[in-house]
Amino acid sequence: MISRAALAAALLAVPIAVPGLLPAQAPAAPRLQLRFHHLHYVVADPGAVLRPVAEALQGTRTIVPGVGVGVRVEREYLLFTRSADEASSRRRVKAADSYVDAARWLASRGFEIAPDALNGTAVSRSLPDERLDHVAFATDDLAAAVGAIKARPISSNDAAATFKLPSGFIVEIVRDTDRPDAYWCPMHPDVRSPGTGKCPLCGMTLVEIPPLRPGEFRLDARLIARPDGGASRVRLAVHDPDGGDAVTNFIDVHERPFHLFIIGRDLEYFAHVHPTLGSDGNFELHQDLSPGVYLLVADFLPSGGTSQLVHRIVTTPGYSGPLFAAPPVLPSLPNEYVVNGLRIRMEARSPGPRRAADIRFELSDASTGRPITDLEPYLGAPGHLLIADNELTIAIHGHPENAATAGPVVTFSPVLPRSGRYKLWVQFQRKAEVVTAPFVIDVPPELR
């Protein structure tokens, strides 16, 4: 005979089905989330690829600390690394196929991928025809993500970890800091980064992005007369846009705190010089100028401000001609010059208003015809380019997109604001000697 206690224990052990109620279940573990971060390519010249990719995607050239340089679109990136023998030997793979391969591999390890296909990303609108190295996804907790994969990474650091898939393709997991940009390049303000670093285009050290300040810095110029007419010295002072106070702190840009271009009204005289900052806060330069009208183009970066390109028209003491003479007619010039044994040939490829124009210079030895490959950096750049229109209302100071080139081809990509004829002066340094050559280019009207 079963006791009442034993019967009660037995009944408690038997599950009782109650209509409308389901048995309690343990909640499913949440899936770890990864969002697409970037595609990483290996290319011959990262600096040369950045501009066309940024234009095609309408993105921002940027630096991702610890990861690479590239173009940002919203929160996604196309990043580029200079090719090496190992990377160049890899077979080409389609980005869409690699994305699916990586997404499936990560999903099998408990991750939820967003988006689930490459065509759902912002960068897929225009992918470069380059060799893809890997696809990367971002996580808020890099250590947790790496631990969940349960596989040994082929490389890892505080910012990223990379894994090799069974197919041989590489997938990378990066720490998703998504910090705001705090630094930029003084010469290429669209190159930005949340941390310090070097500009991939010109090699300059990135500086802090200053707060927005209304108004423009003012440049005052005073010419010291020569006894026989003209000027022998130039004195310059920079004033703050807020209260007009004198500015005395400047950041070196291309090895100098102040670049000054002097252009004669007839567009024949040209000088690229560097005044020195005196104890009184004024820049001073000894420069002989014949009587006439000149355009001063000052390129400087005041501490706590943005890069400035300030124009001033001045007349020298002793000049008695018209102040508002008709603009000179710019004659066509040869597209090839020989200066101190250096042959410089210019080619302007399809220039147009309001878009980057590739102005290409081919350099060779005038006596042997051999290509020049021993250019020396001139003020921190392979070359300098100054462009002006015949009315002296437009002036552009440019540098090559590829900061590492030593020839024989040097390409500049200035944006010319309107159609018309422009005079330009290009400067290179070889064997410790700076050479300057003038050219003229025509920008046709914009097609409608």
Image: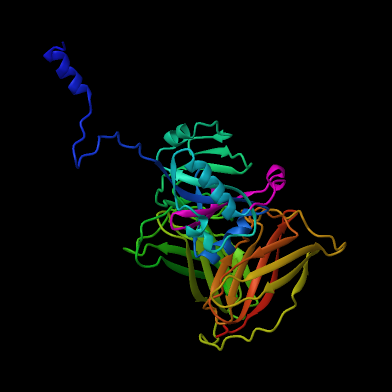
In the displayed structure, does residue 152 sit left or right of residue 308? right
The image quadrant that residue 244 belongs to is: bottom left
Instruction: Please determine whether, in this image, residue 154 is positioned above or below residue 325.
Output: above
Q: Position of residue 324 (x, y in %)?
A: 51, 87
**Residue farthest to the front?**
1
Looking at the picture, how far across and down is residue 344, in whole percent? 75, 67
Report x, y in % for residue 151: 53, 32
Whether residue 436 appears in magenta in the rendering, the answer is: no
Q: Is residue 18 above or below residue 382?
A: above
* Residue at x 56% of width, y 74% of height: 416
Q: Is residue 89 magenta?
A: yes
Q: Looking at the image, can residue 248 be seen?
A: yes
The tally of labels here is: 0
> Does residue 35 appear to the left or right of 83 in the view shown?
left
In front here: 85 or 253? 85
**What residue lies at 83% left-to-right and 65% top-to-bottom?**
366
Q: Nearer the viewer, residue 262 or 89?
A: 89
Q: Position of residue 407 (x, y in %)?
A: 73, 58
Residue range (magenta)? 67-93
In the displayed structure, does residue 119 sit left or right of residue 27?
right
